[in-house]
Amino acid sequence: MKFSLLAAAALLGTPVAAEFFLKEQFNDDSYVERWTESTNWRSKTEMGVWKRSAGKFHHDEADTGLQTTVNHRFYGISAALDKPFVSGDKDLVIQYSVKHEQKNGLWWCLHQTSPWRR
């Protein structure tokens, strides 16, 4: 797909205003105070444990995230928003990144159980 120089300039010149309701970088172990591991929906033997890691392949060892520790386990974790989100006419954008280092299958599910659910 080709973009004209004018179209690219218009995209780069468009002002964007974003309001963050939750931003987490997992760069230190203090995330355990803000995040809660979900443990009640599966038996303890089926649940895995999260760890903070830069992963096997990284550019900066200090740039860490959450990593699953055991294959074929269930994982769940959640955190409260820093402030309430009222949708009105605004869209809610949830953005996260996943790095696949294992060759087995990986399934992600985003589950929302908040009052702002549509």
Image: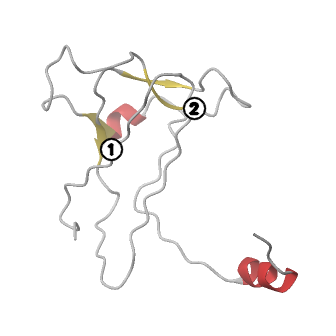
Q: Which residue is mark 2?
A: 64
Q: Position of residue 33 (x, y in %)?
A: 33, 35
Q: Residue at x 31, y 69 (%)?
A: 85
Q: Which residue is mark 1?
A: 109
Q: Residue 54, located in which quarter of the rendered image?
A: top right
Q: Pointer 2: residues within 10 angstroms few (<14), some, or many (20+)? A: some
Element assignment for label 1: loop
Three-letter amino acid code of the residue under disc 2: Thr
Q: Position of residue 95 (x, y in %)?
A: 48, 55
Element assignment for label 2: loop
Q: How many marks?
A: 2
Q: Residue at x 47, y 46 (%)?
A: 24
Q: Position of residue 65 (x, y in %)?
A: 52, 33
Colour setup of the view: secondary structure
Three-letter amino acid code of the residue under disc 1: Cys
Q: Pointer 1: residues within 10 angstroms few (<14), some, or many (20+)? A: few
Note whether 20 is above or below 110 in the view shown. Answer: below
Query: Where is the C terminus found, in terms of image quarters?
Result: bottom left
Q: Position of residue 23 (x, y in %)?
A: 47, 53
How far apart are the alpha carbons under marks 1 and 2? 21 Å
Q: Which mark is residue 9?
A: none
Between 53 and 84, the one lying in front of the other is 53
Q: Residue at x 56, y 77 (%)?
A: 17
Q: Residue furthest right?
A: 5
Query: Where is the N terminus found, in terms of image quarters?
Result: bottom right
Specify whether 16 is left or right of 52: right
Between 23 and 98, the one lying in front of the other is 98
